[in-house]
Amino acid sequence: MKEGREERQEKLPIDAKLLSEAVMELNISRRSVSIYPREHPLTRGAIERAFQLLQRLFEIRGSITLGIVKDTLVIDEYILERKNPVFREFAHNLSSRGIVAITFTSGVSMEELLLLHELITMQDSLPAQDMIELAGQRGLTHISLSPLDMSRLRFVEDRMREGGSETDLYEDYVYALLEGKLADGDAEEVVLNVPPGNIATFLNNRLDEETSGETYERVITTYLKGKGEQKSRGELFARFVSLIEDLTPELKQQFLRRAVSTGVMDSGEIDRLLEKLTLDDLERMMNFFKGHPTLIPESLRNLIDKLGAAKKEGGFFDTVSSQRTVVDDIEIDGTFKRFFAEDQFQNFVSDEYRTELERMLEHSGGRRSAADDELTRVCSDEVIEKEVAEVMLELLDADTLSREVCLIILTKLSGLVDDFLETGRFQEICDIHNSLYSHAITGRFKEETSGMVDYFFRSENFIAKLMDAFKTWGRHNREGVFRLSNVLKHYVMSPLFDALSEETEAAVRKFLLEILVRLRVGVVPEAARRLGDDRWYVVRNMLYLIRECEGSKYVSFVRPFAKHGDRRVCMEALKSLLAFNSPDAVAYLKFYLRSNNQGLRDQAIALAGSYRTKEVIPYLIDLLERKDLLGREMYNKIPVIRALGQIGSPAALEPLRKLYCSKTLIYRGLIEEIREEIFRSLSSYPPHALKGLLELGLRSKNREIRTISERLLRGHGKEDGKNN
């Protein structure tokens, strides 16, 4: 036992401070690679410092192996400082990717360190074995990664692996556990994978009569108080029983005595554990303790006796199909059943007491107070995450801030931004960006913060995720989207156009158009460049953006599309020409008002009214007076009436009066609708020109027409009074 300890202590001829500095620089370089490209000065500088420190370590020993247990680093059986956040972060990053050891060998190059960090910071996390294969393909010859099920471990899913080395890595973990240098929870994963017989053999060779009681308790605690889910607690206990069976008689008695006398688990934990055990596990436990009766406390002996008797009688245990055991502590007889019967309630509870209970229940679910609502709000994830971000941004202003802590804060902020993207919190993202941008100009660590602004917020990966977030969450947080888009407009402009071109959902396309219109500057040239797209809807959207962003200088780009083969495109172009007051806009409008295509003509009528184009009034009157033998033109007159009403020219009043007075036997219902539409459209005409029509309206049998006529006449009377 003592010789083994001496051998292990001699394994550490290494400068602890130098090792700590090397690990810290490795973690800093890892973070740099995750934020900046490999050619960035910060990345190259961090890699170079880590490389130089490793070279100094190689002067002491040819290779360095770091074991990883969750967030703890182990070299040989020695644990690096647990409380150091850098060590914990580096270990956690590797552990989360299934890596339990990393070995650096003399001859490692800076290029290999870069490749290592690129592997362990990949966005798409690979299984540990795939990562190791990829490392080999990329030429990592002086750095080796060890997954949990690698060949250096002799166990995989409870089976011994052929070709395993004589010195197994799990022995280092178990030895560290025995020495109190490893937390019990950190050894749990090894315990679950190593066959109990192997650990028993190791303990038989390592423990003797001089071993302290604390050593036994560490092993017992690892098995009986595992941190895993309840389903693994039963498995751990079964493994503990198997372990005891393979120990020497002396160690067996020591472990049993410690297990039953130290109170590792309370009665409640024992009950939950028993529920998880199979009948076979219970059988082994009962037989095992019967062979060592002097070690069992009186209470546990009584329990085992009852379990044995119940098993013979079959009345205490009720075995279900899953081979689990259900224990009934109390059997309720008929008296108690009658007591709990609903119709017996009033026999035992007075009316006064029952009334008081009902009154208490009425108020138990009462309304929440304003204080309750405020507490719920301030404790929400959104508020907490926002406060965390604000605190970290304030820390960047601290005079005592070191470069290392600055990099940690930047890394954490990048993680928060990713979280905010997933929930559409664009205001918070914008605030973080603006704060870091300010630090990049005037802060102490300009290179670090400007690097995050340039290589994180402006990266293709971030912009791609931002586009997805805009489409998913943007309509629920419009102002946040507009703010953030304006800040990053030079980087989101082209991706927004690409997203608009590919989007199939109309509502999302409309929102993307809204974002681009709000950006305004720079939108028109890009829209004009994309007018050559073969897709009609893309061209239509580009014409819309040119118009809405006031791109009148690009009218020459718009004009050719006024005669486009697709009706939707040519009408969008015509609308833009009208908006820009292009001299040829009226000519195109007249052309479409004479079209035989009903759809084109209707849209041209609507545009004439919207832009109040007086030059086409004769064409609209012609449509108003047009007749055909079957009377189908009657259905086309209402849009013309509306367009003339928007223009408000007195020249249209006489044709409207004639139409109002016209009669038909076939379309009596339709002519009444036309008459109502005529009077609804009169408010834009000059008041003095309406007298004849309004007098006709006063005599109408239609109540709506009379009401409109009276209202317009009263309004005109008031105007006349003011003028007099």
Image (cartoon, rainbow, N blue to C red):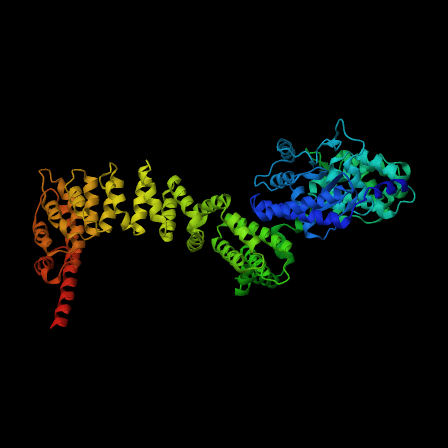
Quarter-of-image position of residue 210 = top right
Quarter holding the N terminus?
A: top right
| Direction top: furthest residue | 162
Q: Residue at x 57, y 41 (%)?
A: 123
Taking the image as shown, residue 50 lies to the left or right of residue 682, namely: right
| Direction bottom: furthest residue | 724
Place of residue 577 in the rendered image (x, y in percent of width and height, measured from the top left)? 23, 47
| Direction right: furthest residue | 209
Taking the image as shown, residue 565 lies to the left or right of residue 636, namely: right
Between residue 438 and residue 481, name the one nearer to us. Answer: 438
Quarter-of-image position of residue 322 = top right
Between residue 673 and residue 533, name the one nearer to us. Answer: 533
Quarter holding the C terminus?
A: bottom left
Q: Residue at x 16, y 63 (%)?
A: 711
Place of residue 705 in the rendered image (x, y in percent of width and height, measured from the top left)? 15, 56
Tell me how many marks there are.
Answer: 0
Between residue 254 and residue 609, name the one nearer to us. Answer: 609
Place of residue 695 in the rendered image (x, y in percent of width and height, measured from the top left)? 9, 60
Place of residue 278 in the rendered image (x, y in percent of width and height, measured from the top left)? 74, 36
Quick check: can you spot residue 693?
yes
Taking the image as shown, residue 440 lies to the left or right of residue 157, namely: left
Between residue 602 and residue 492, name the one nearer to us. Answer: 492
Quick check: can you spot residue 158?
no
Taking the image as shown, residue 33 lies to the left or right of residue 612, namely: right
Quarter-of-image position of residue 30 = top right
